Amino acid sequence: MTEIGAGTRKGGNFISEWFGHRIYPMARSDDAVLRDQQMERCPFLSAAKGEPNRCIKNEKSRGVCTVSTTSGGRRQDWLVCPYRALDPSLLSSTVRRLFGFGDAQPATIMPAIRLADPEMRAEVADRLNAGERVFIYFDEKLGGELSIPSTSRSPEFSFDVTIIEVEWADGRPHVGRFGVLEIQTMDFHGTYGHAVRNLKDTLRMLPERFAEMLNQTPRLMSEKVEGPNIANVFKRTFYQMMFKFQLGRSERCAGCALAIPQAVWDSWKPHLGEPVLVPQGDGTFNLFQPGRERPPHVPAWVFVFDLDMASPQTPAPINIASIIATDAPSFSYYALDVAPAAALENIATPDGMISLLARRLAGLWPDLARTIVINGQELLRPKRSRRKRDPASLS
């Protein structure tokens, strides 16, 4: 593997993974990486299906897996394609938490689309018969998306990934409980189209120097790439997550897991009142409303993960940073009680909304602006007029 680096820029937004392989801050290139990029192959869908699969994204964003920006004083990767999270370790950890069994117990986890192969069905039956646990998962491209149909009293809700346990009984397989995995990506303002075009043109004209050119010319990966739309993602996602976190109340459901990149989780913390995670003895954390104990069956899990940028492996593996047990009432408490309370406390502070109102009014109606008082003090005091001195008094 050839690695050539020219260092990272402190600012700016860059496409950081293209067709599954890192191109920023250091582009990696070997024959396999170059083939994926030239064939526009998605390594994650290809691995899941067991056969080559082209990237499914549209022309202007094709191949873009993650985008690197500076957030909170440090550079982070933001996931922009949910298939980037189809990592065997993340899937295994999610399934084991939802269905309640440990790492020592063998389990097979595969996309449902593979069951179209009679040999695979026979293999599943053999594994079930041998006492192994088997799970299949459905996704839009891996067997078809599943959803709860709408009724007159409830909306339709589709699932990113639906996991089904296949059980062995009476000498044949049966459908067992289901679990839900939601994968949180980030929306970005604008388009990646200009940077994607730069990458395609450079790869077409200089394939043998592709990595070198990217490392020497970082702007190729950043042209007109705008920042993340943080507030929109939380607002768009919150109600859906509250709804899906409640699924664990059904005896047919093993629960719901939210897989969220570290960068997105960090951006969500202010919306949740900067919650304190309580460590448990099993390596997980609790995020429950004060006075609310973790139930024997946890209905909702949050998996916070990041990409291992330092790994020599490509695509870079996923590291799970935190596994958080929670439920819908607790998530709602932090989002709708704790965070608003903190916002209310900030209304009447020197840097709060009332102070901003005073500054806005100062240019429109100064006398009205001076009536605004915080902690017994006027925010805007009338300016003292300077007395003009008589020139004669100076002599």
Image: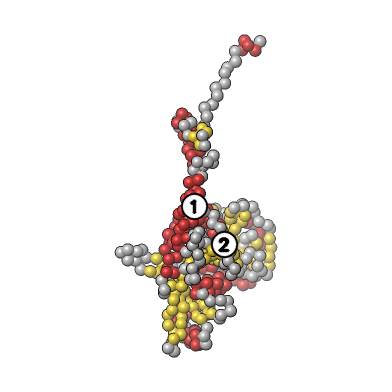
Give the SS element for disc 1: helix
Tell me which corner region of the image, top left, top right, bottom left or bottom right, holds residue 155.
Answer: bottom left
Q: Which residue is mark 2?
A: 278
Query: Taking 138 as reference, is 129 above or below it?
Result: below
Q: Residue at x 52, y 37 (%)?
A: 375
Question: In the orientation shown, which residue stands out farthest toward the bottom?
Answer: 171
Which amino acid type corresponds to the residue marked 2 in the rendered image?
Answer: Val
Query: Taking 333 as reference, is 382 above or below it?
Result: above
Q: Residue at x 65, y 12 (%)?
A: 394
Query: Taking 133 as reference, is 189 above or below it?
Result: above
Tell me which corner region of the image, top left, top right, bottom left or bottom right, holds residue 208.
Answer: bottom right
Rendered location of residue 174, percent (x, y): 42, 82
How is this picture coloured? secondary structure
Label whose residue precedes the other's in the sequence (2 or 1)? 2
- Residue 216 relative to residue 138: left or right: right
Q: Residue at x 45, y 31 (%)?
A: 368
Q: Which residue is mark 1?
A: 339
Q: Is residue 5 visible?
A: yes
Front-most of residues 229 and 190? 229
How crowded pointer 2 is (Cα within 10 Å; few <14, some 14-19, many 20+) is rated as few
How crowded pointer 1 is (Cα within 10 Å; few <14, some 14-19, many 20+) is rated as some
Cα distance between the residues tagged 2 and 1? 18 Å
Question: In the orientation shown, which residue stands out farthest toward the left?
Answer: 152
Rendered location of residue 98, percent (x, y): 50, 72
Front-most of residues 187 and 61? 187
